[in-house]
Amino acid sequence: MSSEPSLLSRDNLASGAIQQLVRDRDGEEADILSDEELLASRRSLIPDDHQGEVWLFGYGSLIWNPVIEIAERHTGRIYGYHRRYCLKTKIGRGTPEKPGLVLGLDHGGSCLGQVLRICDTRKATDELDLLWRREMLNRSYLPKSVAVHTKTGRRINAITFVMNHQSPSYVADLSLDEKAQMIAEAHGFIGTSLDYLDLTLESLNDLGIKDNYLGEIKRRILAYKNSS
């Protein structure tokens, strides 16, 4: 699978460089969670003295760029949520003038993705704190524990991040053509919305997962580009 050079790295997350980029751009309007808020959020699911394995469920970029160290992966399905382009981004893959779109887990249906085990339970909380800096940069997602059902019949409890419907970045009423145009045009300091889509489609294809919804959006993007 191809890779994407990205500012979204371990070093940049640990140092707070990503958060600072947003603060530099948005000033007092930047709605960035503080270190204390991030820690409290992570501890609400995984306390500091947690014993045992820690698993994550990835449905988009966590599959192809988890950033944290992963020891084990399995294809699996969760129920009650589906993969959807429903999160407007003016930060990493868009700008305030031309926002992009990234994926979230929205209510209803089910989602095939990948369940990922953090490599070393002795430092799982350190890895999770990096993950929280990545996924919980602002208040667009809500961390949640979900049951992942693997193809081998195993049931694994995992952490994932679902869409926060109270977030001003949540978009529920855009047509597929509107989403395709936003994705086709948006570019932020992490990269383009189109690269995000292409890498997600490629990673799902490598897992043997066909996502008709994402495929239809890609077809509409190509049609939009050909008509421009």
Image: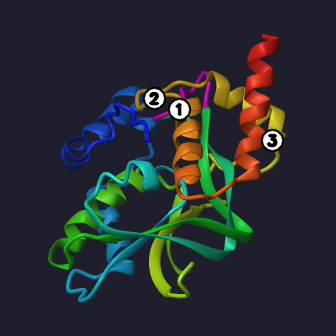
As shown in the figure, which amino acid type bears the numbered disc 2?
A: Gly
Quadrant of the rendered image containing residue 150: bottom right
Residue 2's spot in the image, x, y percent? 42, 36
Q: Secondary structure at mark 3?
A: loop
Dot 2 or dot 3: first in sequence order is: 3
Disc ID at residue 191: 2
SS class of the residue under badge 1? helix
Q: Nearer the viewer, residue 185 or 22?
A: 185
| 211 and 27: which is toward the camera | 211
Q: Quadrant of residue 113?
A: bottom right
> Where does the C terminus fall, quadrant-wise?
top right
What percent of the width, then of the height, locates residue 132? 35, 60
Percent across and percent down for residue 147 are 54, 83
Residue at 34% across / 28% down in the picture?
Answer: 24
Q: Quadrant of residue 175?
A: top right
Q: Please provide the residue range marked out in magenta.
A: 92-99
The structure residue drawn at horizontal position 54% and vertical position 58%, both measured from the top left corner, is 207
Under circle 2, the secondary element is: loop
**What residue is disc 3 on?**
174
The N terminus lies in which quarter of the figure? top left
Compared across the picture, whether 12 is left or right of 62 comes to left
Mark 2 neighbour density, 10 Å: few (under 14) some (14–19) many (20 or more): some
Q: Which mark's residue is nearer the viewer, 1 or 3? A: 1
First-in-chain label (1 vs 3): 3
Amino acid identity at mark 3? Leu
Vertical arrangement, residue 190 with respect to residue 32, above or below: above
Question: How many marks overall?
Answer: 3
Tell me whether the residue at label 2 lies in contact with that at label 1, contact meaning CB atoms closer than 8 angstroms: yes
Question: Is 133 inside the magenta-drawn segment?
Answer: no
> Label 1 amino acid?
Asp
Between tags 2 and 3, which lies in front? 2
Dot label at residue 195:
1
